[in-house]
Amino acid sequence: MLSSTHTIPQKNIAIMGATGSIGDSTLSVVSQHPDLYNVVGVTGFSRLDKLLSICQQFKPTYVCVAKEKEATFAQMLSEAHLNCKILIGEQGLVELATLAEVDMVVAAIVGAAGLPSTLAAANAGKTILLANKEALVMAGELMIKAVKQSNAKLLPIDSEHNAIFQCLPTAVQQQRNAIHDDNHGIKKLWLTASGGPFLHKTLDDMKRASVAEAVKHPNWSMGQKISVDSATMMNKGLELIEASFLFDMPVSEIEVVIHPQSIVHSMVEYNDGSFLAQLGSPDMRTPIAHAMAYPDRISSGVERLDIFKLSGLNFVRPDLEKFKCLGLAYQAMQQGSYACIALNASNEIAVQAFLNGDIRLTDIADINEKVLLQAEKQPIGSLQAILAVDKLSREQAHQCIADLNA
Ligand code: NDP
Ligand code: MG
């Protein structure tokens, strides 16, 4: 394990989405190892007070905010006597993610907004700690191609994917995307899911669910969008697509299993009958610390898992009628990349509409299904093509919401 006496050079980190939940966990790990990590840049979007306090504590050289917040934030920095260089909007995100002095990019912006900077980091050959699963769902082929061409490193910090990564042979870990070339005796990937707050509730309960009930995850503390995605199990659907691209496994060889305790974070099944699993307390600082130090290990501040206190570990099959969004993800992967983009875009619009109180929780799956049906088969070879499908699908989702409320 690394310690302060370890002589590896300090790594420069850019944290995209520093004001969010993954941002919090990353900064918590960084603050425990100031000798190993230097925060070069951070980004925020709407939470300026939080962004300012991050700047006060970590003194980054660069900070990126939305264009309309630039003047206000510049004033805030000046009043706090901080002279960070301000980068602006989407262009600023890309600039930060590709700066020569940045070694490691933590991709933790939520949704499609994170795609351009995550893809730019991949093209620039950075080490990417990937939380922003939507980037892979939208642009899996492009991302993996960019990683290979530029020799970037893509380390998953989504807990399930990080768990799978930890259970893979070193040869696969170090040669990204290599499972399918030589399957190393790997039979199947098992993605665990908690089942979210409605696991033991009926579909009718889900229909009546309030926003507060939907975002109250039993085991994890996360941002609002991923919390709603966990309630509908769209999150597991997005993760299925994420895993397929990350590990080059067809979705038919990836199985989702509900494990309500969230202790086993995922598993790899081998041809000889072995299942390798990664276990730990449900705290994102474990996968983040793992990826930050990979291939070494550092402490994370996570409460130690007390094996003697575990009352039991259960594994059950997901109910695809209740959690229709999970089935839609399998369907989208069978259709092709254009369908994954459409599904992701529709879901982002529908989740926001639910959070705004405009639709019911169960409407999200129906809207996603309708938009997926409308998605037109087409080749996806560029960021422009992705953004065009994304834009059209968002419009279609808005139309579905308008129809529901008409
Ligand atoms: P949060 O909502 O807590 O944080 C999102 C971050 O993105 C914030 O910094 C936010 O800024 C920023 N942001 C939002 N919209 C934009 C935009 N249009 N442009 C630029 N920045 C923007 O989300 P999480 O931290 O929970 O999740 C982040 C990503 O990580 C998601 O893709 C999620 O699926 C993934 N993930 C999260 C896990 C978790 O435990 N939280 C676990 C596994 C994956 P601001 O707050 O200032 O508005
Ligand atoms: Mg996850």
Image (tube, helix red, strand yellow):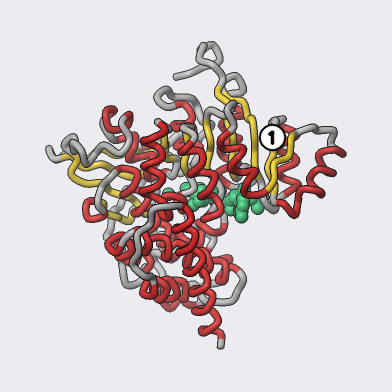
Mark 1 belongs to which amino acid? Tyr
Residue located 57% across and 31% down the image: 13
Q: Position of residue 313 (x, y in %)?
A: 32, 48
Q: Position of residue 110 (x, y in %)?
A: 54, 52
Reply above or below: 300 against 375. Answer: above
Residue located 51% across and 65% down the image: 391
Q: Is residue 308 visible?
A: no
Question: Which residue is more in the foreground, 259 or 344?
Answer: 344
Q: Which residue is mark 1?
A: 62
Residue located 42% across and 36% down the image: 155
Reply above or below: 337 against 117. Answer: below
Q: Quadrant of the N terminus?
A: top left
Corner quadrant of residue 204: bottom left
Q: Quadrant of the C terminus?
A: bottom right
Which structural element holds mark 1?
strand
Question: Which residue is more in the foreground, 286 or 111?
Answer: 111
Corner quadrant of residue 99: top right
Corner quadrant of residue 195: bottom left
